Image: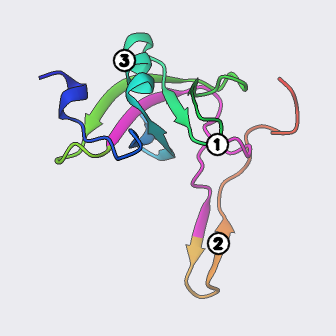
């Protein structure tokens, strides 16, 4: 059965996808895909996402050049989410960090603390 037929897209036609680094297995970001983003990802080998804020499919890294080459694609046991293993070029986070998960919760202070270091200046045009 084709992949698209076993996946359970939500009522908006979207499925969440966790993107993770192929070497470190570190989570990089969480995005959403519609059927077209999934098709383009499978055809090109580059992650495409459905940008809810823009209402369209985009190549991840389309504006920054920080693309993600797909190494593996996994579906969870119920087919309602994806995990995509990638080779990340430069960084996944638009805020300048390698991963979007650069802040860790500290229960003693009840605050999020920055634990990552920026890898690029998001204000600079590349």
Write down the residue under mark 3. Answer: 42
124 left or right, relative to 33: right
Number of disc labels: 3
Closer mark to the observer between disc 2 and disc 3: 3
What is the residue that sits farthest to the left in this orientation? 1
Query: Residue at point 41% right, 43% down?
Result: 12
Query: Residue at point 57% right, 54% down?
Result: 101
User: In whole angstroms, how far apart are the C-alphas of marks 2 and 3?
Assistant: 36 Å
Q: Earlier in the sequence, mark 2 or mark 1?
A: 1
What is the residue that sits farthest to the bottom in this orientation? 108
- SS for tag 3? helix
Write down the residue under mark 1. Answer: 53
Question: Magenta part of the protein: which range?
Answer: 82-104
Residue 24 can be seen, yes or no: no
Closer mark to the observer between disc 1 and disc 3: 1
Query: Residue at point 64% right, 86% down?
Result: 109
> Could you tell me residue 49's position as x and y percent?
51, 31
Q: Is residue 40 above or below residue 95?
A: above
> Could you tell me residue 104's position as x and y percent?
58, 67
> Could you tell me residue 98's position as x and y percent?
63, 42
Q: Is residue 8 magenta?
A: no
Q: Earlier in the sequence, mark 1 or mark 3?
A: 3
87 left or right, relative to 39: right
Assign the magenta stretch its main secondary structure: loop
Residue 93 can be seen, yes or no: yes
User: In whole angstroms, how far apart are the C-alphas of marks 2 and 1?
Assistant: 25 Å
Mark 2 in CB contact with mark 3 (< 8 angstroms): no
Q: Which mark is residue 124?
A: none
Q: Earlier in the sequence, mark 2 or mark 3?
A: 3
């Amino acid at each position: 059965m084709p992949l698209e037929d076993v996946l359970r897209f939500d009522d908006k036609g979207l499925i969440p996808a966790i993107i993770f680094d192929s070497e470190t297995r570190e989570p990089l970001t969480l995005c959403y895909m519609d059927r077209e983003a999934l098709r383009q990802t499978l055809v090109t080998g580059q992650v495409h996402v459905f940008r809810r804020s823009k209402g369209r499919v985009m190549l991840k890294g389309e504006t920054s050049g920080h693309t993600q080459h797909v190494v593996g694609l996994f579906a969870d046991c119920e087919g309602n989410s994806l995990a995509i293993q990638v080779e990340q070029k430069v960084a996944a986070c638009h805020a300048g960090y390698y991963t979007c998960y650069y802040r860790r919760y500290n229960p003693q202070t009840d605050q999020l603390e920055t634990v990552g270091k920026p890898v690029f200046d998001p204000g600079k045009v590349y």
